[in-house]
Amino acid sequence: MADLGDGALLRPRLRNLDAFPVDQDGQRLLALRDPAGVAPGVVLLPRALVDLVSLFDGERTLGEIQAVLARRHGAAPSAEQIGHVVSQLDDAGLLDSAGFRARREAIDDGYRRAATRLAVHAGGAYAGEAEALREQIAAFSSGLGDPAVGPTGAPRAVGAPLRGLIAPHIDFHRGGRTYARAYRALAEASDADLFVVVGTCHAGMPDPFALTTKAFETPLGPVAVDRELCEALGRRYGGDLLASEPAHRQEHSVEFQAVMLQHTVGPVRPFTIVPVLASFLHEALWSGADPAGDTRVARFVDALGESLARSGRRWCLVAGVDLAHVGPRFGDPEPNTPDSLAAVGLADRDMLAAVTAADAAGFYASVARDGDARRICGLSPIYAFLRALPGAHGQLLEYAQWPDPDNAVTFCAAAFT
């Protein structure tokens, strides 16, 4: 059991967790899950504990929590009972405490020492064996037609080379056709051998950008990271782009693109990637700050542009992003309906008009207008992607929704020349 002598546990603070309702055996429970993957599994709270745990804000002592509950309900658990709940949640890794920080440090150190970045989500979000994975991708690519011919059967015209690609990061079985649309465009219009992959950091991190220099394992073989360009980018950026490197350990947004690149490009030519996680723009939304004034973003974009220009390589920028997240699973009071999802689609398409115009400021404004009510998951990487492709011309290839009354997610494929 956790040591309540830890001062942090005398004023317990719940970590930044995913919280969502679930039904189990006729009961409505609150599920808590760690998006960083430091705390394994999911903890289910009965309704009677939700009010208690909501008071774990790091400000109140156990006695003060007890007093609040007594005022609200006319009775309250004892301080000893509250301490027992605190101890259980800390043992599960859900509280910000010395025990949790030691656990996270050990896990982070293990990642830094690892030779490669493991295929963490293989066998879950996508097939874990090579042949099964090829069959899975082939299945959701079927029906798109021969990549060498146009819709009339005539040879497909080759246009300007692809400078950028937006693809989903939803599980393959949900977003397969949209992945296929995106990577078909890449196969047809890119001869790149260097891909800068910018993905969402779902768990958040203290730095706006994080690289990792570890090769990405996939069921189809490892995807090499361009260490030379990573080092050049870090020098020009003027900051430590590896400070938050362990954020890559569990994050799927780049992993899924590495798999698709290995499937699409790997059999054709050698290639390398520069894996980047981004997390900075929600903070601007919350504070009302102008993201264009964030010097860290400008420095990163400038450093990336100069590093790519000096590399002499054929490159393409890839954003691994999803769009809206709506429904009770994400905090909305009402279930999704066909009408509400149609409204989400209209708002998404309005936002995507700014994206395909490569208008970073317009994209941010469209999200900020309603306070990010749709919870755009790819906010930071899309903004950075657009800032890094000035003057680009985008085409929306496909917009899709994974509709569900409790948790609907939207995503797209778009190509930029």
Image (spheres, helix red, strand yellow):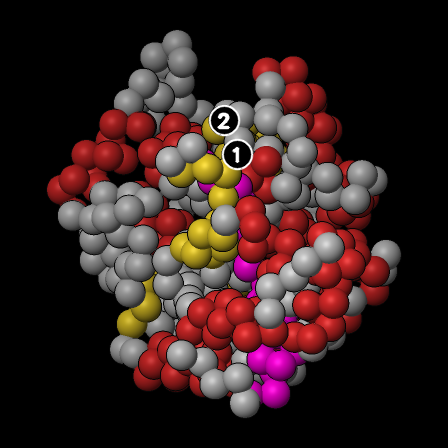
Residue displayed at 40% across by 13% down: 151
From the image, tell me which residue sits under label 2. Answer: 404
Neighbour tally class for label 1: few under 14, some 14-19, many 20 plus, Cα within 10 Å: some
Q: What distance separates the C-alpha of mark 2 from that of mark 1?
A: 5 Å
Residue 300 place in picture, x, y as percent = 65, 69
Q: Are marks 2 and 1 in contact (CB under 8 Å)?
A: yes
Residue displayed at 59% across by 25% down: 336
Q: Residue furthest left?
A: 131
336 w.r.t. 112: above or below:
above
Residue 289 place in picture, x, y as percent = 85, 60
Residue sitting nearer the eye, 366 or 184: 366
Identify the image quadrant of residue 235: bottom right
Apparent side of residue 351 relative to residue 254 in the rendered image (left or right): right
Instruction: Give the extent of the magenta segment.
Output: 6-23
- Queried whether the magenta region covers residue 413, the answer comes back as no
Q: Would residue 250 be visible to someone looking at this image?
A: yes
Residue displayed at 26% across by 51% down: 122
Apparent side of residue 171 relative to residue 32 in the rendered image (left or right): left
Figure quadrant of the N terminus: bottom left
Identify the image quadrant of residue 9: bottom right
Identify the image quadrant of residue 341: top right
Please, what is the three-letter code of the amino acid marked with disc 1? Answer: Asn
Neighbour tally class for label 2: few under 14, some 14-19, many 20 plus, Cα within 10 Å: some
Q: Would residue 307 be visible to someone looking at this image?
A: no
Q: Which mark is residue 261?
A: none
